[in-house]
Image (spheres, rainbow, N blue to C red):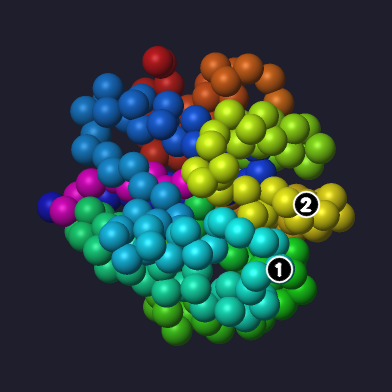
Amino acid sequence: MNKGKFISFEGGEGTGKSTQVKILYNHLITKGIDVVLTREPGGAPGAEEIRQLLLTGNPDKWVPMTEVLLFYAARVDHLNNTVLPALKAGKWVITDRYADSTFAYQGAGHGLGASVVQEIHRIATNNFWPDMTVLLDIEPEAGLGRANIREAALSEDKREDRFEKMEGSYHHRLRQAFLDIAGHNLDRFRVISAEGSIDQVADRIWQQVATTFGLAHGK
């Protein structure tokens, strides 16, 4: 059986990733493709427990190295229990975030450095990367505005807003880090503007996915 395809979605806060991964998932299903939709941190029972440690609470609750190690503990659990078995079975996997987020958030945003994160990634995942990464790009202020509206609609115990609480300069470093990572991995990354309507963004993504994997462009 052919190995499935692994697609990750990346971007700063409020870029619309969670909405767009679901749209792409449904689109691929209509094309007769068996797809698993997942997320990081999370996507497996142990990883979901770690998610709560990482995404809730005070922005300063972890030092950068602790944060990276927690993300990779969750990532290994996710890969071994969800991603790799699905790919081996010939299914496609779409994940809302993967390792590029760690390089951007902790490596650049927190100043830990790409070389440190790369060594941890190599050891923990055997340097495993997606077939394609969609980077949704938007001005940080616009993205944070969207994210704050989303979180305000949730009860306080359900808010996963630890990173959104970080200072504005952090989010500008984050955006630039994602763009830099994409610029150094042009074969894997597709940078998509997150401006405009949900349908407009979804159309941009589908054109890139269809072209990359040889699928029919029509909806």
Numbered tag placed on residue 60 in the rendering: 1
The residue shown at (24%, 34%) is 33
Q: Which amino acid lies under the numbered mark 1 shown in the image of this protein?
A: Asp
Q: Front-most of 176 and 50?
A: 50
From the viewer's perspective, tell me whether residue 73 is left or right of residue 179. left
Q: Front-most of 182 and 164?
A: 164
Residue matched to label 2? 171
From the viewer's perspective, tell me whether residue 166 is left or right of residue 124. right
Asked which secondary structure carries label 2, the reply is helix
15 w.r.t. 182: above or below = above
194 w.r.t. 112: above or below = above
Q: Which amino acid lies under the numbered mark 2 shown in the image of this protein?
A: His
The residue shown at (66%, 36%) is 147
Give x and y (percent) for residue 158. 50, 43
Task: Work out whether residue 54 can be spotted.
Answer: yes
Q: Quadrant of residue 125?
A: bottom left
The residue shown at (20%, 50%) is 90
The residue shown at (59%, 65%) is 102
Task: Magenta stretch: give its range.
Answer: 89-96
Q: Front-most of 43 and 88?
A: 43
Give x and y (percent) for residue 182. 66, 54
